[in-house]
Amino acid sequence: MGNTSETVMSAEQRKILAVMLVPMFMSLLSVSIVNVILPDMQRSIGASNSAIQWVLSGYTLAFGVFLVAAGRAGDLFGRGRLFVIGVGVFALGSLIAGLSPDPLVLNIARIVMGIGSGLLSPQGVGMLQQYFHGKLRGRAFGMFGTIVGVSVGIGPVLGGGLIAVLGDEWGWRSAFLINVPIALAAIVLGKVWLPKSAWFGSGAEPDPRDRHRADFDPVGLVLLAFGTLLIMLPFLERSAGAWIYALVPAGAAIVFGWVKWENRYARRGGSPMVDLQMFRTRSFAYGASLTSIYFVGMPGVWVIVALYLQNGLGFPALEAGLVGLPSALLSAAGAQAAGRVVLTFGRKMVVLGVGIALAGIIASALIVIAHETWGVSIWWLMATLGLTGIGQGMAISPNQTLTLAEVPVEYAGSSGGVMQTGQRVGTAIGIAIVTAVFFVVQSLGGYGAAIVAGFGFIAITMALAGLIGIIDLARGRKKTQPRTEYTHA
């Protein structure tokens, strides 16, 4: 694979992309589709508000907690193996969720689905690192950005469509059951299409004479997983009361202890769960920080837009979902185009993309003000949010390409897991804050003022993300070229 042309994908690379991207699309779709089907699901199985909230929270927690450990397991034991296991676990959870008789079974099934997503997702990122190089890696991550954008936009529309066609009961159930045949097909194709090296650690077949046990760092695994759980939980289970936020500093202390452990483990000659030296690499440190801050803001856009359109203006779920469709499609197109030229423009493209996305958020707030004041059609949000989608496509996938460019392939899975964990933690914190802002302002000044305030918070976080990119540029990274070794700042 190392001698593959820099501009033309081989048949094997195209097969790897097909096997990787379809299940990753499926797992991301399971996030965006649930918001639309929640009311019908709640009525069908008689779930309380707190029980139905765990349909969202359980999936998100399990997804976030398993990412880094799963990424490291793929690095050591073979990304193909962990990927197929993850897809199988996700399929099992989807089957149980679609047939759930009560809220308890449904919530357990969603946790199982989250574990499956956490297992398979970092393997996809690791394989893109392992089997794609140079410009082809940028294109591959561009395609990954495309499926992210499409999954966000198609989810609400697909969920609303299934309910409209199949009815309240089987509409929401089919949103889960549809995953099962797709997952089974992905497992079969993975067995047939993934290269032999994908089934062994570090992309190479093991020496049968080498009987040493893989160094998985179980203490590091437990510390990071528990710390991540305590940090995310308060932002996903806010009904427990203010006391639950005491878990955040406790979780941060555990993560700090994990850092100390990893450094000590490496000094003693062990293979740490995460090679913390990667944070001394400027491209990784700045890129991971940028994406974590960006995800504090951006995912909240679709939460407050849905609240405003459905609760404030009385839009049905399908119409509310259609408002975000142009943004998703333009984000997908932007990611594809940016993936082809990311190595030419480097971090400049990321900064420009964040700036365009920020302009779209500001323009969306102005549309809401114009609608509330002068009666301007709220459907203009399709255009302004579309601008945000273009910017997101230019920012997220190129940033991922540049951030992971200098990470050794033997740590590709765990480093991708670190980035995705930052995104999941940022998303949990951001949605908690933006919905709190929304409801406080809504109680004081109505839905129009609430969404404008929410857009204001999102704009601040995006400006901070852009500032990180500008600082990186100011420190001299005019252009990033992928290499196989660390370059310390």
Image (cartoon, rainbow, N blue to C red):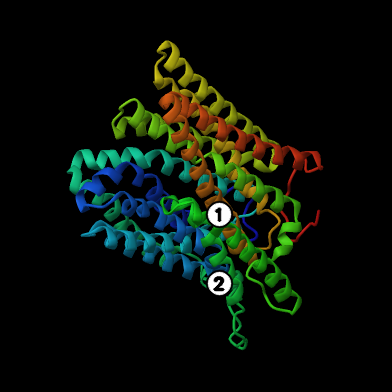
Of residues 426 and 401, the one nearer the viewer is 426
Foreground: disc 1 or disc 2: 2
Q: Quadrant of the N terminus?
A: bottom right
Q: Which corner quadrant of the image does residue 322 belong to? A: top left
Q: Is residue 453 above or below residue 261?
A: above
Name the amino acid, label 2: Val
Label 1, label 2: how many angstroms apart (C-alpha)?
18 Å
Q: Are marks 1 and 2 in contact (CB under 8 Å)?
A: no
Q: How many marks?
A: 2
Q: Position of residue 213 (x, y in %)?
A: 59, 84
Q: Which corner quadrant of the image does residue 162 belong to? A: top left
Graded by Cα atoms within 10 Å as few (under 14), some (14 to 19) or many (20 or more), the crowding at tag 2 reads some
> Disc 2 on helix, strand or loop?
helix
Q: Position of residue 331 (x, y in %)?
A: 50, 36
The residue sitting at 45% across, 27% down in the picture is 444
Graded by Cα atoms within 10 Å as few (under 14), some (14 to 19) or many (20 or more), the crowding at tag 1 reads many
User: In the rendering, which numbered label is found on residue 242?
Assistant: none
The residue sitting at 55% across, 54% down in the picture is 420
Q: Is residue 248 visible?
A: yes
Q: Position of residue 395 (x, y in %)?
A: 60, 39
The residue sitting at 47% across, 23% down in the picture is 383
Residue to which mark 2 is pinned: 222
Name the amino acid, label 1: Gln
Q: Position of residue 369 (x, y in %)?
A: 48, 18
Q: Which corner quadrant of the image does residue 484 belong to? A: bottom right
Left or right of 291: which side holds 16? left
Of residues 111 and 203, the one nearer the viewer is 111
User: In the rendering, which numbered label is found on residue 420?
Assistant: 1
Left or right of 440: which side holds 392? right
Of residues 249 and 391, the one nearer the viewer is 249
State which tag comes first along the sequence, 1 or 2.
2
